[in-house]
Amino acid sequence: MAGSLGGMFSGQPPGPPPPPPGLPGQASLLQAAPGAPRPSNSTLVDELESSFEACFASLVSQDYVNGTDQEEIRTGVDQCIQKFLDIARQTECFFLQKRLQLSVQKPDQVIKEDVSELRSELQRKDALVQKHLTKLRHWQQVLEDISVQHKKPAEIPQGSLAYLEQASANIPAPLKPT
């Protein structure tokens, strides 16, 4: 699929992207890990991609659609999904290891990222607080309008029905579900 996506984006040559430089003595994501049963030219990313394609293909395969043995179909799909999950875990471990290396080698970079994340979280929460304050002001105004009506008994026409009509006229109508 990497080859089929090559050239799809402008300025990108066809074929797989070149591997990023790794640390000396460390296996990069695009190199097979030692002891792993991978071909020499296969990478973890390639395997993840091919296992995803296999999962997708097993779900739309004509063999499975026309097949009569449901247990065989289920077993095949389960195997594809399990392989994909295993490779996804390996990929996650790789990135966690790189994150750990970064935190050891450049702790200031990790702190900068954490500060940036905290700032964006504060901005999001400030926006949420402002939204709630706006709603609060609206409902305070509604309550104040209702209480002002109750304080003017002389202006309200006599009779219980007229009083109820006057009081209910200022209550906002409930929203109808769409």
Image (cartoon, rainbow, N blue to C red):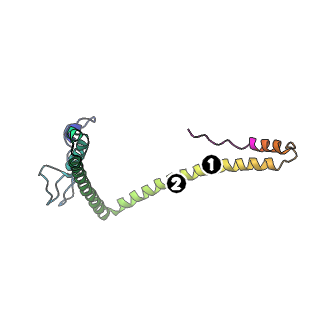
* In the image, residue 104 lies in the stretch drawn in magenta: no
Left or right placement of residue 155 versus residue 142 in this view:
right
At x 24% / y 49%, what residue is drawn? 74
Three-letter code for the amino acid on which mark 2 is drawn: Lys
* In the image, residue 173 lies in the stretch drawn in magenta: yes
Can residue 48 be seen? Answer: no
The x, y position of residue 14, in whole percent, is 20, 37
| Viewer-side residue, 8 vs 73 | 73
Badge 2: residue crowd in 10 Å (few <14, some 14–19, many ≥20): few
Task: Name which quarter of the figure residue 16 lies in.
Answer: top left
SS for dot 2: helix
Earlier-in-chain disc, 2 versus 1: 2
Residue 135 got which mark?
A: 1
At x 21% / y 58%, what residue is drawn? 23
The x, y position of residue 128, in whole percent, is 54, 51
Task: Report the residue that reaches farthest toward the left.
Answer: 40
The x, y position of residue 90, in whole percent, is 24, 57
- The residue range painted magenta reads 168-178
The x, y position of residue 126, in whole percent, is 54, 53
**Quarter of the figure with the N terminus:** top left
At x 60% / y 40%, what residue is drawn? 176
Task: Name which quarter of the figure residue 68 lies in.
Answer: top left
Q: CA distance from mark 2 to mark 1?
A: 15 Å
Viewer-nearest of discs 2 and 1: 1
Q: Which residue is mark 2?
A: 125
Q: Is residue 92 above or below residue 19?
A: below
Badge 1: residue crowd in 10 Å (few <14, some 14–19, many ≥20): few
Three-letter code for the amino acid on which mark 1 is drawn: Lys
